[in-house]
Amino acid sequence: MNAPLVRLTSLAHGGGCGCKLAPDVLQELLAGHPQMNSFAPLLVCNETSDDAAVWKLDDNTCIVATTDFFMPVVDDPRDFGRIAATNAISDIYAMGGKPIFALAILGIPLGKLPVEMVRGILEGGASICAEAGIPVAGGHSIDTPEPIYGLAVIGTCKPEHIRRNADVKVGDALILTKALGVGVYSAALKKGVLSGEQYAEMIGTTTLLNRVGGDLSSDKDVHAITDVTGFGLLGHAAEMARGSGTTVVLHSGEIPYLAAARELAQVGHVTGASHRNWTSYGASVKLPAAYAEWKQHLLTDPQTSGGLLISCAASSAERIVNQIRSAGYPAASIVGKIEAGAPEVRVTA
């Protein structure tokens, strides 16, 4: 971890996916949004709180489009760029698509950041795009009070490979591909208590592309996919439940965490976004009796560039989780199931 010329996080009031508007605020803002169902080729839009928009070009090809950007979650410029790019591309994979190119989104407080640091952010983002096999074909930059970076990403998929978050089926198993705790680690980083080893673990997970989502979309036993980001595991599970009209059951003892996440959460290293998340959707979540508050915070912890939450046929769950692990996601675990019932999330001990 190189010492930066300027601490990027000192220039931002929040960082990473913790910057997202709270779910209840977002729902209020979109309450009067025009319905999109008059556009027949628009197969997926914001009506199901999905990860990207999908437009059907013809019987064989769909365009998948997304944009994602945020303020620094780390101080190293290159790492910030890598994390932001990985996070943005994830939306394409979460829909079952493959990215084809990206456009950069850059906001910089002129006079506060040296040119070499800004160049580092852009180089970091471009390196992840190169890893994904896509170019950064252009972009847009403005002068902003706080540093902002991200991407607009375009991808493609076949119509039958689209995987919406609302297409879960009763009886499905749920698989989470990455460990939770990125928000907890970022809170510890800001307070100067995150070790070098823990920082490396955080960078490792946040710069791991979710390309397995695009690979799994051709598997008919994989029914729904979403990525777990700013709303935490509970928030994105709640979107699945609401969109499908089912109950999402999460087994807390099976959920994977970063090595020190539980220890850090117990001593108070949680983000403000974790509190906001619970305020937004806690009413639709049932926790076990006497569930520790720090455990709740881990489930609402905002995941910058988190993993995928995959709903698949229970009979194929072990095969699919082994396939995911073999593809380079060692933390992948079966963490729950889908049941008939009210659209809510129920957590078991």
Image (cartoon, rainbow, N blue to C red):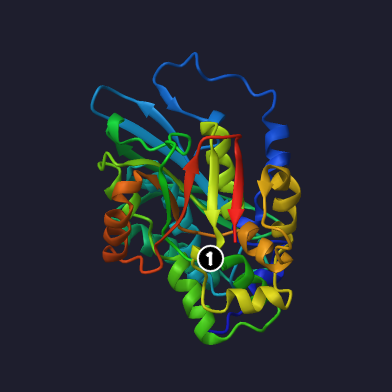
Left or right, residue 319 beside residue 203? left
Residue 71 visible in the current orientation: no
Asked if 216 appears above or below 244 in the picture, the reply is below
**Quadrant for the C terminus in the image:** bottom right
Left or right, residue 212 beside residue 273? left
Which of these two is toward me, 241 or 128? Answer: 241
Coordinates of residue 315 in the picture (x, y in percent): 30, 47
User: How many marks do you count on the picture?
Assistant: 1
Coordinates of residue 1 in the picture (x, y in percent): 51, 83
Residue 170 visible in the current orientation: yes
Mark 1: amino acid = Gly
Coordinates of residue 16 in the picture (x, y in percent): 60, 60
Coordinates of residue 67 in the picture (x, y in percent): 50, 44
Q: Is mark 1 on a helix, strand or loop?
A: helix
Which of these two is toward me, 316 or 16? Answer: 316
Asked which quadrant contains residue 158, the reply is top left
Asked if 4 appears above or below 274 in the picture, the reply is below
- At horizontal 68% and vertical 42% (from top left) the residue drawn is 284
| Residue where numbered disc 1 is placed | 253
Left or right, residue 164 beside residue 31? left
- At horizontal 55% and vertical 38% (from top left) the residue drawn is 241
Left or right, residue 7 beside residue 209? right
Asked if 249 appears above or below 125 in the picture, the reply is above
Q: Rate crowding at label 1 as few (under 14), some (14 to 19) or many (20 or more) other CA atoms within 10 Å.
A: few
- At horizontal 41% and vertical 25% (from top left) the residue drawn is 43
